[in-house]
Amino acid sequence: MNELNSYGFGGAASGNAGSIAASRNRVLRNTYWLLALSMIPTVLGAWVGVATGFSLFAGSPLMSFIAFMAIAFGFFFAIEKTKDSAAGVFILLGFTFFMGLMLSRLIGHILGFSNGASLIMTAFGGTALIFTGMASIATVSKRDLSGLGKWLFMGVLLLIVASVANIWLQLPALMLTVSVLAIAIFSVYILFDVQRIVNGGETNYITATLAIYLDVYNIFVNLLSILGIFGGNRD
């Protein structure tokens, strides 16, 4: 082995490993920067939505859901097609603005509480803690979490089915259960998505940002919903 190293084979392998590690670190770093940037249009969209009273098909939750899914998947398709160009960044930021608009009804509802601003900050802080913790674990963990993908996807499908069913059932207990499970599922999704970058399974920072953004967004929304149920103060 020492002889091989003396001829440069060991050095080449070491250099190649270093190059791969650097590339993965670059993707992760760019993902985190773009994720932070995506918060700006999200907040702007939420502010515009609250200020204008934005509502997608107000009074028709089912139509709102169908319209939301159609627009969201339109964005997903466009992001996938442009992920290797600068246009992909702008489309992603446009999507996060749209998601901010969709968040505005919940934000407006929470701001109706006397402690609404405090609840929003608490949800933001809780989401940040979950993200930091899960991302840190994913970065240092040696355990392969790739097998969780199909189970997490099935969990998301069940959440969607339960959410649609509750449009008609209007069961507070079901809504609370969905929110708790959503926080758990998307917290694990952060582990899964960050580890994919670390292990080289995801090499495009735009699609990586989209995946992690959706994880963080869903944790925040459901955490805020739970805080509104149990901590909202009308006084």
Image (cartoon, helix red, strand yellow):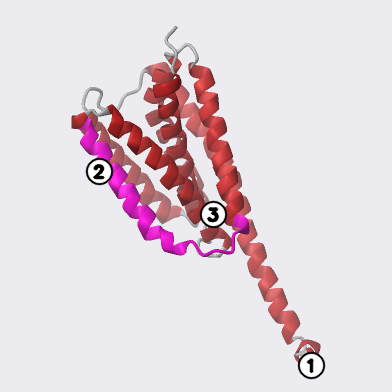
Residue 133 image offset from top left, x and y in percent: 59, 45
Check residue 161 in the rendering and tell me which mark sits there, or answer none: 2
Instruction: Reply above or below: 40 against 182.
Output: above
- Whether residue 139 appears in this view of the structure is yes
Q: Circles 1 and 3: CB distance less than 8 Å?
A: no
Q: Residue at x 42, y 13 (%)?
A: 112
Q: Secondary structure at mark 2?
A: helix
Which comes sooner in the sequence, label 2 or label 1? 1
Q: Residue at x 18, y 31 (%)?
A: 168
Give the residue pinned by disc 3: 194
Q: Outermost residue toward the bottom?
A: 3
Instruction: Reply above or below: 118 against 63.
Output: above
To which quarter of the image does residue 36 belong? Answer: top right
Q: Secondary structure at mark 1?
A: helix
Name which residue type carries label 3: Val
Residue 129 image offset from top left, x and y in percent: 58, 38
Residue 41 image offset from top left, x and y in percent: 50, 33
Name which residue type carries label 1: Glu
Label 1 crowd (10 A; few <14 / some 14-19 / many >=20)? few
Q: Is residue 56 magenta?
A: no
Residue range of the region highlighted in magenta in the rendering: 139-167
Q: Nearer the viewer, mark 2 or mark 1?
A: 2
Q: Is residue 157 left or right of residue 88?
A: left
Give the residue pinned by disc 1: 3
Label 2, label 1: how many angstroms apart (C-alpha)? 62 Å
Instruction: Reply above or below: 206 against 123.
Output: below
